[in-house]
Amino acid sequence: MRPFYLFICFLFLVSIPSMDAQNYLRVSDPNAWDVPITSTPDWAEYRTHGQFDEITIITEPQGIFTEIEFYATISQGPDAYSWTGEYEIVWQFDLPSKSIVHDSWLWIGSDIIKADIIDYWTALQTYEEIVERNQDPSFFYRLSDNRYEIRIYPMFEGESRKIKMSFLVPTEWDLEEVKTDLLNNMLQSTDYGPATIGIGMLVDEQWDAPKFQIDNLVIPMTDTVVNGAGALMHYMEWSGSDFVEAEKTALIVDAPFTDDNIFLSTFSEGSDNFYQLAYVPDWQALTGEPTRSLIILDYNEAKTEFSKPFFKNYVEEQFQNHFKPNDEINLAVLTTNGLQFLSETWWNFDSETFGDTLYTLLEAQDTIDLVELLVESFTWAESQDDIGHIYLMAANDDYVYPPYADEIFLDLENLMPTDIPLTIMDYQNENISIIFYGNEEYEGNEYFYELFEGLNPEVDFRVYRNSSQMFDEWLQTIFPDLETPTGIIDYTTSLENGITYHRYSISDVELNEENQGVILQTGKYLGNFPLHVNANLVTDNGEFYNMSNSIDIPNIMEGDTLMREMWYGPYLKELEILAGSDDDRLAIVEQSIEERVLTGLTAFLALEPSQGGEPCIGCLLNSGTIIPVNTDYDSIVSEASLSASPNPASEEATIRLTYTNTLSAADWTLGIYNMSGRLITSLDSPNENDKVLEWKWEIGSKVSAGVYFCKAQSIHGELTAKIIVLP
């Protein structure tokens, strides 16, 4: 017979009224007469706000998504009430669009229960039987407006409950960085927040040097800790009120692009092959008309406050922002051997090597003679075709005396191009000569450069003295940043021998200055690499551009099992939209359970052991515990080892810990835990012998046969060994 619950579940979900989208955390008596049910739109009138006691956010960048483990400890808060001293926690919150929920834990006493994902209707009935009331569901599920709700019951007067929820949150990419929303809006749910927020990220070479952003402030995460499983983690704590009230919080890591602005990772399991792609085509280089510019440099350290390295850095930064890779430039300086150029002909602008090349050229300048520099530069320019612009950068006042300037200019006027724009940048701001001539005051070479303006109407003469404007800002007015083209990007991916098919994708990208047209995609593939990416751009004025790239095996990074969720999350949402029958909905439920990805037809339900919940021993090793540790000790735990013998054991076992000179016997404690994660016994007074500690465990008749865990703990981390006890 067809499962009836699916049809009921579907009707229930689509019939819930639209609710106020504000997040909230409520703690109240589930049977109180004035407690609003989920579908009540005026819930905010009820002031039974719960309290967040502790919040820890652990992140692990994955690429197109970041996994966020959200640990929360919740108590009743000062305005909660109950006749019986028994409360229910109700927490509703938003997640960013396209987020994927794939795990939920509940702490019950000393146990951690990893929630089962089951069909929505069974989860609802099970929870209602426990709470013994007939209201909306009390478990972790997705609301009809694509928000989420978790209900936890019971919580008794003066106690607290701890949970963990795991999300895959979509990331924002640009050419330099990958940003992940740290979900502070989830905590904008109550008046009572935690004193501090813990923020961590597992240490990973691929995603090194993380930063924390709160509004416009960006702080490097430089401190290192270890978590309960002994893994290294970047970690910091921040004011809870500041975190909650911020308009934006984010984790920022460097974008792991190849030289071609490509990130590609893959994961294979059985017959399934998954991939994720981030790609930023260089549309500026393709869409902008290439230019050809000659830059004439006259540097005199005695005439400017800028040392050669600083001058080089200022020029490099502005040129990198102004010139495109298909632009051609040449730079000229004067040496005792004559003019020296950046290139014998023209140089295709390369932002990666320009800085070093510029500094080498500046070092080669060993003489100062502005007129000779201009004569040779203008002579070279006359032999070239299609020069779009000539720039003169000079710190020079050798021609301050006007009659002398008139005489010198005679050597130049027949050589100076009169049909090419010439920008003269006078950046002398120290030891400036001043002269009064013809009732006019002239500073430096000002009169000399006015002669250029009289000969060429396209001369633009600009002066930098002790301006209120910074030098780099002044240069930016001369070399403005490139304008990002705007328009629509569409793209396709394919294999050399095979096909790709995607789920999470931005097929049409609105190219603008903010997103730089970054292309993001997760999908499956069938066949062999290389992967071909073909991107098309139609600009706002209707022009069409095409760019192709290929990615082969050496540039592919290794992914992990979370790439399954990256695929199945969007896939199941698509199926929900298209579902038209009970067969369709049954297939969604089965796939959701198999992949452990939450849908509107399933829910996470965590029950205490007496109700059938199973404690999760593996969860204890990653329970969100943070152990501050000096970075000097990063490798201490990895240099120690823990073992048990005999194994299996029946009457007595020896637990042996071997450690290095950086630790002492006093650093360690040892406990024995059962499969439920409960502490069975603590072992004291180990024997010490040459950096080896040995504990004797007298098993005895009260210890049941089964699997147990020996856990050695120190302030620097933990070690765990498994031991089997025989009857």
Image: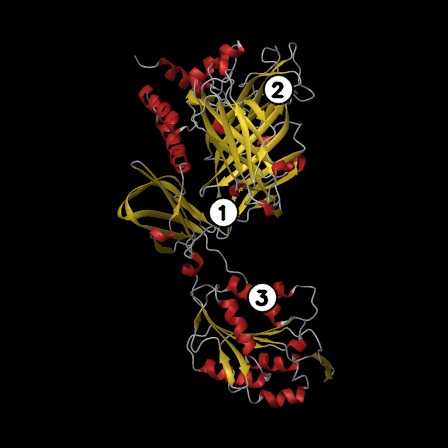
Locate residue 467 relative to residue 650 in the image: left or right: right
Residue 650 is situated, as x and y percent measured from the top left of the image, at 45, 21
Q: Which residue is mark 2?
A: 27
Q: Are marks 3 and 1 in contact (CB under 8 Å)?
A: no
Foreground residue, 324 or 307? 307
Q: Helix, strand or loop at disc 2?
A: strand
Percent x, y of residue 94: 53, 30
Q: Amino acid at mark 2?
A: Val
Q: CA distance from mark 2 to mark 1?
A: 39 Å
Where does label 3 land, which residue? 313
Q: How many marks?
A: 3
Tell me which corner region of the image, top left, top right, bottom left or bottom right, holds residue 625.
top right
The mark lying in front, picked from 3 and 1, is 1
- Residue pushed farthest left? 497
479 in relation to 488, above or below: below
Q: Are marks 2 and 1 in contact (CB under 8 Å)?
A: no
Q: Is residue 52 visible?
A: yes
Residue linked to disc 1 = 207
2 or 1: mark nearer the eye: 1
Image vertical order of residue 376 relative to residue 60, above or below: below
Residue 96 got which mark? none
